[in-house]
Image (cartoon, rainbow, N blue to C red):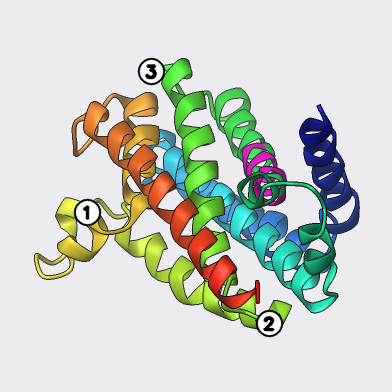
Amino acid sequence: MKQTIAFGNILLKDMRNYYLKPPNISWGIIFPFAWMLMMFVKTKSAFHIEEVFSGIVAMSILFGTTSMLSVTITFERKSRSFERLLLAPLRIELLILAKITGAILFGIFNSIIPVLFSVLYFKAVVTNWTLLVTGIILLSIISTLLGLFISVSAKEVFEAQTYSNFFRFPMIFLCGLFIPVAALPVLIQPFSYLLPVTYGVDILKYSITGDNALSIVLDLTLVIMFCFILFYSSLFFIKRKWII
């Protein structure tokens, strides 16, 4: 019971203190929304909405979650409040889960805007709503864990944002967001399959259009596997670098 109360209090504190920080607003909401408007305007003359729907949703999640973690983790580390949390009678695994849950919820919230805009305004057809919701949740988790893994090495917010951008912008072109992995040069394709976001995007594409590059079972399995790998890898580095 005490563990649950501590988990909830940490989550609420992060939501209250960090959700409206400038980096979250700019990178987590405005940038994906601006890109979404650009692609939607382009859609009227050059694309079908289904071709960009999954990419816009995935990018909103990716930028929202990683921006959220960049703020929360680096602020906590700089102010040394993370060290104070370590003194609480709370397992380190549960503490990290409490820190990342806010970003996961932030990513899910970010996905609602493009989904509603695409379905209600552009009349986009979703083939499988259950799988779409599942894909959004899994992509929010994997993007959050990527942000956690990247932010572990940063000491300042601008450092975390820089590290995040180093990975985020290549992912736009390598993960099948707008360019199918099969259309990339053969030498680059192996790098795409090393990125966990690739499989999350494939789930979204299948849920919207019914088309996917890989087996949906394989996509789900690999995303879950990457979640465990990133979580415990981040936990290892946190214990090694932050806990003396």
Q: Is 29 in front, or is 86?
A: 86
Amino acid type indicated by mark 1: Val
Task: Give how far across and how far down residue 63 sits, in percent.
Answer: 58, 58
Task: Give how far across and how far down residue 76 sits, in percent.
Answer: 79, 68
**Residue 215 within the magenta-colored segment of the rendering:** no
Total numbered labels placed on residues in the image: 3
Quadrant in which the C terminus is drawn: bottom right
Quadrant in which the N terminus is drawn: top right
Residue 155's tag is: 2
Instruction: Compute the Cα span from label 2 to label 3.
Output: 43 Å
Residue 127's tag is: 3
Nearest to viewer (mark 2 / mark 3): 2
Compared across the picture, whether 210 is left or right of 229 comes to: left
Q: Is 41 in front, or is 35?
A: 35
Task: Give how far across and how far down residue 168 sits, in percent.
Answer: 48, 66
Query: Can you name the residue that lies furthest to the left here?
Result: 186
Residue 128: quarter of image: top left
Instruction: Compute the Cα span from label 1 to label 2.
Output: 34 Å
Q: Is 244 in front, or is 165?
A: 244
For mark 1, what is the residue?
181
Q: Name the secondary structure under disc 1.
A: helix
Amino acid type indicated by mark 2: Lys
**Residue 103 within the magenta-colored segment of the rendering:** yes
- Image point 77% across, 35% down: which residue? 3
Which portion, as a residue range, is magenta?
Answer: 99-108
Q: Name the secondary structure under disc 3.
A: loop
